[in-house]
Image (cartoon, rainbow, N blue to C red):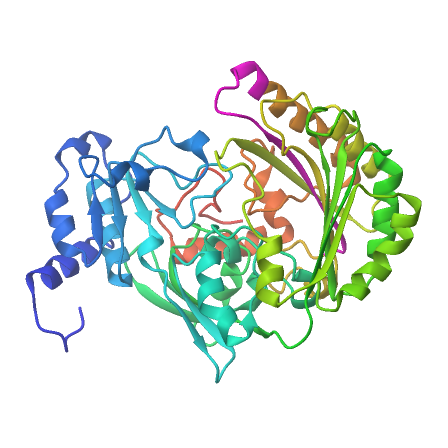
Amino acid sequence: MNRSQPITRRGLVQAGLAAGAGLIVHGAPASRASAHPWADLAAALDGQLVLPTDASYLARATPSALRFAKDSPQAIVVPATSPDVAVAIGFAREQGLPLRIRGGGHGYAGYCTTDGICLDMSGLRKVSFDPSTGTVACGGGVRGVDVRKGLLAQGHWIPAGNCSGVGLAGFVQGGGFGFYQRLHGLGCDSLVEAEIVTADGRIAQVSDASDPELLWALKGGGGGNFGVLTRFRLRTFEIDGPSSVAMTIWRGLPTAPLVDRIADMVAQTGDELTWHFTCDATSPDDLGGFSLPQVTLMCHAFATSERIQAALDPVIRSYPPAICVVRTLPFAQSHDFLSGNHLPENGLWYVKSLFLPGPLQQAAIEVLTQAAGRWPGSSIGRSGTGFIPWSGRLTQVAPEATAFVHRQPGYLAVIQTCWGNEDPDEIIEAGRQWAEQTYRELLPHSSGGSYQNWIDPDLPDPLRAYYGVNLPRLMRVKTRVDPGGFFQLPQGIPVGAP
């Protein structure tokens, strides 16, 4: 409690509950769940406590990924301040309740859902740009759309992702890539300081000066492992030149040679151009009767449209596309063109990933293009395989310089299956098995690493896949800041000696 503030009932309750965070061991019997003193918790918060009897409960309890909506929290805390977070942690520990953090609710394995307390960070969405340092301060619940509103008008931007609803705190802690990565690096590379509430209720200011090891861990060590990020500051870059975008779609053409030609083109372009391309396994009806997968190539350039067109022309001459749109736009419009939810809004999807080192090999191309052609199908499309070129500034950082270890130039490969609300279990399982088979076929051509922001619950050795040689160091940080393992996820960093 701040001694300069007047003593109030709320302040006394806050102090008592936060203090409990350091006294109670996580994991008390769940049988106490029916007798939790929710009124005491509500009185201690500046933010909201939402219970199942409240009108707003269902909307707040439902994550973006609807396949994980079966877990219903006993309560939802919407903190308005960092002390609110400390209060929620103290209460959860005192009452023996699990606590999970929800930023944007887009977690790929549903780890933001719980039958205990859901810490809904949407009450902390302030964005503040400091022109003197060129940095932006973000609340722990800030999403991509909030940064767009608060930062673009200042003529600055960050290495943000493609989906406007994703929580930025989790994005940064898991690495964070997007259409600006080749020139400006990953989201985690722009993190300069953070405020985090740890398991003992302490509100810690983390920087290179105060706690360089914890700051290192927050740069790619995965959200929810070390505490609750309530505020963080990112370096920005100035938008001071042209910005262009492109979308090119090919239909009914042999996919493997086309993808090979695209990869050759990408390798010859500068870092001012960032490319993503996919083999879209949609139904023949969606493709106008074509039986081959659709190939979609997207690009953002910190350059004029002529720069993109010059790169595309040799590919287009050999493989005429069905659609090719290339435009120079104001940066805000180009960002909007590339943004959006690239997965179905119903949240019914399953994603696997692998990092492919070096130039894109023919064997890997064959695996991914052939897989797209044999996707078993569902009532909706938007499934298939994807190629994220992994090059430029993000690969100029040493693997041990941040917790994000995946720095070798190459590609990030994506395997994605989606389904509709009415699809039967056999359709869903067929898609999942298709993704697993494609992963196994691609594994020999990969580094074995997977992208930690796309949590994959079926990985055989997830911690090695996500963190590689950085895992022992991450475990040491975890053991220091959360020795009791209060923040423990199914694929979370464990406490103990490496």
Asked if residue 39 is positioned above or below residue 30 in the image, the reply reads below
Q: Residue 189: name its quadrant.
A: bottom right
Q: Is residue 413 magenta?
A: yes
| Start-end of magenta stretch | 408-428
Could you tell me how many numbered marks the image carries? 0
Left or right of residue 81, residue 438 in this image? right
Locate residue 33, reporting x and y percent.
19, 33
Residue 178 percent coordinates (x, y): 62, 56
Q: Which residue is more in the foreground, 39 or 36?
A: 39
Residue 326 visible from this viewpoint? yes
Query: Residue 161's x, y, as percent?
Result: 57, 55
Q: Is residue 192 visible?
A: no
Left or right: 43 with respect to 211? left
Residue placed most toward the observer, 383 or 75: 383
Q: Measuring 59% from the left and 27% from the top, which residue is drawn there?
A: 380
Q: Quadrant of the N terminus?
A: bottom left
Q: Is residue 219 left or right of residue 249?
A: left
Residue displayed at 11% across by 57% down? 13
Question: Residue 30 is drawn in which quadrant?
Answer: top left
The image position of residue 69, as x and y in percent, is 38, 32
Residue visible at 49% across and 65% down? 215
Relative to residue 136, is residue 310 depicted above or below? above
**Which residue occupies the extreme bottom position in the image?**
132
Q: Quadrant of residue 199?
A: bottom left
* Residue 403 magenta: no
